[in-house]
Image (spheres, rainbow, N blue to C red):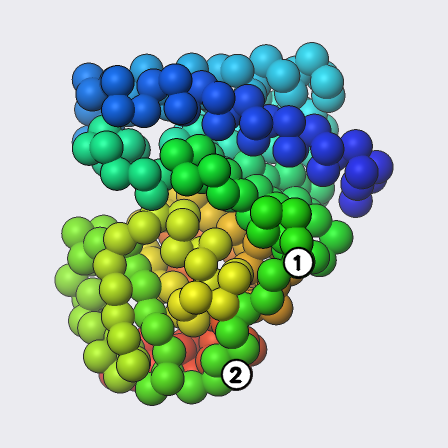
Amino acid sequence: MSDPVAIFTFADALADLARDIAREHFRSTTAFELKADASPVTVADRAIELAMRVAIQERFPGHGILGEEMGRLVGDDQLWVLDPIDGTKAFITGMPLFGTLIAYLEEEVPRLGVIEMPALGERWSASLGVTAFAGNPCRTSGCLSIDEARVYTSSPDVFAAADWQRYERLSKRAAMRRFGGDCYMYGLLASGHCDLVVEAALMPYDYMALVPVVEGAGGLMTDWDGRPLGLGSDGRVVASASAALHDRALKALAENS
């Protein structure tokens, strides 16, 4: 990664910026609009993304930007991928489990990822293959088997019927399954508190920042077919605490599919 210290320091400053704006609006902003895809957006989503975009363009004017609310700004092979509020429904309803996601890519490969949880004051940051939580290195649980795994997904609502059947088959084999949390689930996985996250219908700004965080903590994250996640992935993702668990999860998802 070109000048990793400068990139990491700047990403941390972006997360601070997002935290301040999110806290200003959280539980005081309840109004929202529905976008064309029927997902909600608030004034806070737009304010956070705009502030991060301005900061990036001032510091790295040649870099590209892809954000959930304002689309793509074409740049060189260095790209920032931003989700100003991942979990807007949580934000609107006063639930503190929303976050800001920041990814830095070179030639479409995620080199840095940040999960910032403004309301909780928590942050996972990953760069150069190492993930830290609250400034200290963190690791996944290393769980190896589905029957011992604690499994998360955001909501049944995001799955197509056939995909839900595949997830249901996998998750019912697990020791425990839980719902909800958006990006927070992946931070919990990186810190060893859960073992497997399976989701569908995500966009690049939903998952690109998560890949370095999960993998820098010793986990693995791919699409449902085991392919590396990129800007053109189909939105179905699996994040696992170990390579062995990941392989077993992919096989379980593929059974009778």
198 vs 124, left or right, is: left
Residue 113 position within the rendered picture, expressed as x and y whole percent measured from the top left = 60, 45
Query: Would residue 10 be seen by someone viewing this image from the given angle?
Result: yes
Q: Residue sitting at 53 percent across and 43 percent down?
A: 123
Q: Nearer the viewer, mark 1 or mark 2?
A: 1
Please identify the quadrant where the N terminus is shown.
top right
Taking depth in this image into account, of 254 and 246 the one nearest to the observer is 246
Crowding near the residue tagged with mark 1, few <14, some 14–19, many ≥20 C-alpha atoms within 10 Å: some
Q: Examine the rendered structure and indicate whether residue 3 appears above or below residue 147.
A: above
Residue lying farthest right? 3
Name the quadrant containing residue 174. Answer: bottom left
Q: Residue sitting at 48 percent across and 80 percent down?
A: 143
Sequence-wise, which precedes: disc 1 or disc 2? 1
Q: Residue sitting at 23 percent across and 32 percent down?
A: 94
> Which residue position is annotated with label 1?
137
- Label 1 with label 2: CB-CB less than 8 Å: no
64 vs 189, left or right, is: right
Query: Would residue 81 be seen by someone viewing this image from the given angle?
Result: no
Q: Amino acid at mark 1?
A: Pro
> Which residue position is annotated with label 2?
244
Q: Examine the rendered structure and indicate whether residue 139 appears above or below residue 148.
A: above
Crowding near the residue tagged with mark 2, few <14, some 14–19, many ≥20 C-alpha atoms within 10 Å: some
Please identify the quadrant where the C terminus is shown.
bottom left
Residue 105 position within the rendered picture, expressed as x and y whole percent measured from the top left = 65, 41
Q: Residue 226: which disc?
A: none
Q: Amino acid at mark 2?
A: Ala
Residue 134 position within the rendered picture, expressed as x and y whole percent measured from the top left = 59, 47
